[in-house]
Amino acid sequence: MDDRIVSPNSQDEDSVESALRPHSLQDYIGQDKIKEQIAILLEAAKQRQESLDHILLYGPPGLGKTSMAMILASEMHAGMRITSGPAIEHSGDLASILTTLEANDILFIDEIHRLNKAIEERLYSAMEDFSLDLMIGKGPSARSVRLALPHFTIAGATTRLGALSAPLRDRFGAIYRLDYYDTAAIQQIIHRAARILRVSIVESGSEEIARRSRGVPRIANRLLRRVRDYAQVRADGIVSQVVAKTALDALDIDELGLDMLDRRYLQNLLVKFHGGPVGMETMAAALSESADTLEDVIEPFLLHLGFIARTARGRVATRLAYAHMGIEPSAEQNGLWS
């Protein structure tokens, strides 16, 4: 799944991503309301000479949650440690990370919803009281020692806010949702990346790429690099609308940014399952993909486009999905809509 060019997840080839990341709040394009609130948060913390409150960032992958966490550390002139929920397997892993933090440091935990319960519970006192309880020894002679921690900030990121337990969620002082970017903001991101990569691009070329980027900066940067390759080999090196369209059509990415797997999903839903409702496990089996993959990677953008709806009985298609796929809905389906 992650080898899809329109996958919002980071890929091994994306080592160049770090060069394209914004390094300050001013360089961060889009998410204006969140930026405004975070700017106030940062300034207030600086004036009080305190660490930032714990921050939770959520939303679909590829929208800049990691970049925002890095910017927080940069703006606060603080150190940063990066880990993920699945990487913290034992209490000792958590203890080794927390005890190396210094005052005002930021600990970024990606996929924080995947922390196991025992680790999560140990995190409560660390976030609330800046202390860590350690067990010394074993058996009857074991004793608990409370270790004081410096005031630090946890920046958590998740694609599934609902998967976080209420006690953990409540310990974050600031919770922000990152949403899909509009075409204008994606165009700005493409032009910034083009300057860094020294790509010659015209306005119509950036607009064509932006329209097919699914509102995700990571995908926009990836498509720009593929179109750059095509322009270099098959054109004059300049990314025009014709060059961008030809290159992206060759990659099977349509005018809305849907690829072959997205269209297979819709084709199955519309034809095999007659527009639904169909259960998640049934759809996953039909596509030979895991249910988690469909829920985390495929469905968010289809929901954003209004092509599908989630109901208590399963997934159902909308008129927009039929129109985009060029499939005529059945009389029964038309009857449901009327």
Image (spheres, rainbow, N blue to C red):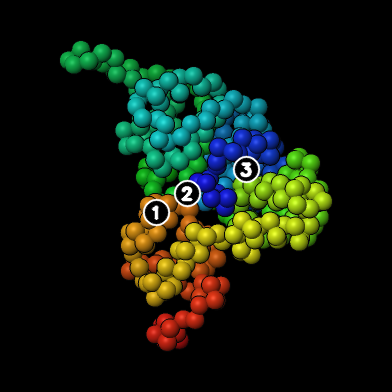
Label 3–label 1 contact, CB within 8 A: no
Residue 38's tag is: 3
CA gap between label 2 and label 3 equals: 33 Å
Q: Along the line of sight, which residue is nearer the eye, 31 or 291?
A: 291
Q: Earlier in the sequence, mark 3 or mark 1?
A: 3
Counting from the top left corner in percent of width and height, residue 310 is at 41, 66
Given the image, on which type of amino acid does mark 2 rest? Met
CA gap between label 3 and label 1 equals: 38 Å
The vertical placement of 319 against 53, above or below, is below
Label 2–label 1 contact, CB within 8 A: yes
Given the image, on which type of amino acid does mark 1 rest? Glu
Which residue shows up at 46% across the image and 34% down it?
Answer: 84
Residue 289's tag is: 1
The vertical placement of 269 against 4, above or below, is below
Q: Residues within 10 Å of mark 3 (few under 14, many from 20)?
A: some
Q: Earlier in the sequence, mark 2 or mark 3?
A: 2
